[in-house]
Image: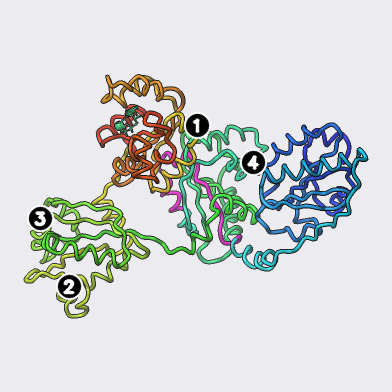
Amino acid sequence: MAGKKKEIQLQTTITNQDQWDEMLLTKGVVVIDVYQAWCGPCKPVVNLFRRLKNEFSEDNVLHFAVAEADNIPTLKPFRNTCEPVFLFCVDGKIIAIVRGVNAPLISKKITELVQEEREIAAGQKERAQVDELVFVEEKSSEETVTETVPEEVLRYLVAIIKPDDVLEGRVEEIKQKIRDAGFAIEAAEEKMLTEEQIRVFYARNKDQPDFEDFVQFMMSGPCHVLIISENETTDAIPHWRELHKLSESESEPEEPETEKPDRLEGIVESESIVNLCDVQDSVEDASRQLAFFFPNFHKTKTDKKVEKTLALIRPCILKERRNSIMQRIKDDGFEIAMQKEIILSEEQVCEFYREHVDQDYFPVLLEQMTSGPTLVLALTRENAVAHWRDLLGPKTVEEAMKENPNSLRAKYAVENIPIGQLHGSSTPDDARKELEFFFPQEHTLALIKPDAAKDHKDDILQKVKDAGFNIAKIKEAALTREMAAQFYSDHEGKPFFDQLVNYMTEGPSVIMVLTKENAVEEWRQLMGPTDPELAKETCPDSIRAQFAQDILFNAVHGSSNQEHALKSIECVFGEIDIG
Ligand code: ATP
Ligand code: MG
């Protein structure tokens, strides 16, 4: 372990048993990061190690190494653990272990051991007889992992749809192509990838000349990260590889795997899915990346799927029986995700029921539906569509009375009216369309203000996503004074106006167009009250409660109504057509 190389390289690399045995001969203290080939050595501790190395540099007493558990028989007990493990070797023996990246503990241990070695070297202390640590193989590691890993690894792989395609609204199209090719999409998330995630995912491309540009390009906007699996076989990776080969032989001279930023300019016609989204191509990569991007994937996968359905309570019963119906909805485990009460126009009824307009019962339906306010509900629970449909019972009141008198259509039937008083979507696909009809997508302008953009960007973006917003556009830019004055024109003349404009222009903000049903209102709810002190009291989960400093430096901005939203979007992005 002595020699020149060590001065350049902080950690010696140990990849086999011989090198391990050689390491044991090192004089002084060796701190070994035991790692798994699939996840690599632990990066966050490197700075700490470097600092300690400098601190204890005089007598060359402290050394660092990284050892790959997979190929070193002594380290077999550490194979297949996800947690980083640090071993401490003194005088040829491993005498201590720290599991996890516990920096204070690692630092304390190193300091103690180095101190002791110095005292021994100076003759102030005798070397104590210390027992070598015996590594106990954790029961769970070998058996369970070898049982579960191959299945998990082979079935799922991570694919990334790049920012330019996301920006151009091609996500659904690409997903459909993936499905058409026989894969199922198990999970999809819109994410701003971190630089580290990009470097890990594209590690195989790191030597390509334009790699740095590519990393920047990948960070320029949100990507979609998908978990895909094959429907029929468990062997997703070989299948994807075959596709890859096919597309390479189809297309002109091997498109480089690294997409260049100029992809933003335009996209070639003859794209196949392997060029539209990137997938790692080895089993190890798949496993590592699954854990990297979706640490809770297997946990969430077993969770039941929460669905949304549309329910209508028609005017005839709404007034009298509203409470009892709402109670029934809650008792059955539904949550009300959105609701509105509206008096429908004839055109709206004709459009909503356009497949029924020729039926005999349509005139009655039309009259019914326009006779007063209808309560429109978006209901969520697992299996919501089928569950609500089952509760409603048979389609017509007559059938419902006969076949299932306990059904809601039977119970809430109105005398002399042959039309059921409640509606529910028939299929998840219908539910989506019907919900869209009543709760159309809205856009709002959301902004992470400069101080929060610096300190809490990732946390805030996570909350945006968790709340179900789609980030239709995103950019980081400092507002000009004109923009800030336009955003806050209503506040001109107020005592805080100048401070506000200074604050908003002091550095880059993250500016987004968010899309969702009811987006303006929902984003304002997620932001919370203007004053974070009030937010902490009344909406502790809101962004301002969690990330704002005070009433001025309050982390986020949101348009106050639809009209403002459109104006601000135009002002920042130069257009109002978000698609
Ligand atoms: P925003 O418009 O930023 O989304 P908002 O609609 O909750 O927030 P407004 O009343 O429109 O709040 O105020 C605009 C911004 O002016 C606030 O977000 C805050 O930064 C600042 N501000 C508002 N009231 C005060 C105040 N009393 N003192 C200092 N700054 C204030
Ligand atoms: Mg405002």
The spot of residue 462 in percent (x, y) is: 46, 44
How many C-alpha atoms fall within 10 Å of the one at disc 3: few (<14), some, or many (≥20)?
A: some
Q: Which amino acid does label 4 sit on?
A: Asn
| Residue, disc 4 | 205
Dominant SS in magenta: helix
Residue 129 location (% of width, % of height): 89, 54
Which is closer to the viewer, label 3 or label 1?
Answer: 1
Real-space Cα distance between discs 2 and 1? 57 Å
- Magenta-tinted stretch: 153-177
Mark-to-mark CA distance, 3 and 1:
51 Å
Q: Which label sits in the foreground, 3 or 4?
A: 3
Mark 3 / mark 1, whichever is N-terminal = 3
> Is tag 1's residue or tag 4's residue first in the polypeptide sequence?
4
SS class, disc 2: helix
Q: Residues within 10 Å of mark 4 (few under 14, many from 20)?
A: some
| 63 part of magenta stretch | no
Please tell me in which quadrant of the rendered image residue 441 appears: top left
Under mark 1, the amino acid is: Lys
Mark 2 or 1, which is nearer the eye?
1
Q: Say if 202 sits above or below 418 in the image.
A: above
Q: Quick check: marks 3 and 1 in contact, CB under 8 Å? A: no
Report how far apart the C-alphas of labels 4 and 2 lie in the structure.
64 Å
Name, please, the residue furthest toward the left. Answer: 416
Q: Is residue 51 left or right of residue 493?
A: right
- Residue 454, numbered label: 1
Location of mark 2 (residue): 411
- For disc 3, the marked residue is 372
> Which is nearer the eye, 204 or 490?
490
- Cβ–Cβ below 8 Å for labels 4 and 2? no
In depth, the one of 107 and 510 nearer the eye is: 107
